[in-house]
Amino acid sequence: MDPENPRATDLERFRSYLYVLAGRHVDRRLQGKVDASDVVQLTLLQALAAWNQFRGRSDAELAAWLRQILARQLANTARDIGRQKRDAARERSLEVALDQSAARLEMVLAAADSSPSQHAQRNEQFLQLTEALAQLPDAQREAIVLHHLEQRSLEEVGRHMDRTAVAVAGLIKRGLRALRARLQETE
């Protein structure tokens, strides 16, 4: 994307956010053929091309619009690889799953009542959190997302990742330590 284009700069702020979401929703059967960063790049390019269709004004509206594009891109990628036929119900379920993942991420920083400046600050913290998450090693990021954002037990995460609960706890501990360090660097 063109760094001179202000629209590209607006979209680029959401790259890590989309990467974390895409990483959670790339079909496991496709992970050897499709990388979340490729899907995110295609999503951002499509968003840039369709910028005149965006009618929102806030970062939250832009994030929701980008999630819709990401869901379509994930469904199209699965279809294009030929592993499964395009299924409108699956595409819709991807949008719902992405919205749910995003809502859990946003709850990490949510407050019951907040002023517009606090809301803006939370949005910035949210983008910093997703940026820091995206920089973690894959296993640490996956363990943290599954345990803290999807609220799965250590045993469930271990079964999902094919690891012991103790190994998952170690991944989470190291990942959270690295997250804290990265977030403190940005302050």
Image (cartoon, rainbow, N blue to C red):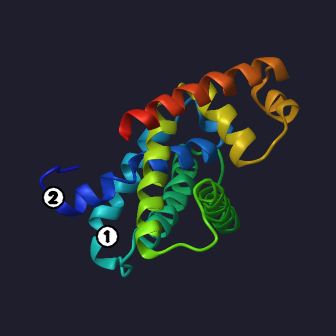
- Residue at the extreme bottom of the image, as rendered: 55
Tag 2: Cα neighbours inside 10 Å, few (<14), some, or many (≥20)?
Answer: few
Residue toward you, 3 or 114: 114
Q: Position of residue 53 (x, y in %)?
A: 34, 78
Inspect this view and state whether residue 46 appears. yes
Q: Residues within 10 Å of mark 1 (few under 14, many from 20)?
A: few
* Mark sitting on residue 5: 2
Q: Is residue 102 above or below residue 38?
A: below
The quadrant of the rendering that contains the C terminus is: top left
- Location of residue 95 in the rendering, given as x and y in whole percent from the top left corner: 61, 64
Disc nearer the start of the sequence (1/2): 2
Q: Residue 138, how many percent across, how many down?
A: 57, 28
Quarter of the rendering containing residue 165: top right
Q: Residue at x 67, y 61 (%)?
A: 100
Residue 164 visible, this orientation = no
> Which residue is identified by label 1?
50
Element type where label 1 sits in the image: loop
Q: Between 167 and 74, which is closer to the camera in this rendering?
A: 167
Determine whether the residue tagged by mark 2 lies in a helix, strand or loop.
loop
Q: Amino acid at mark 1?
A: Ala
The residue most toward the left is 4
Considering only vertical position in the picture, is 62 above or below 9? Answer: below
**Image position, residue 89 (x, y; %):** 70, 67
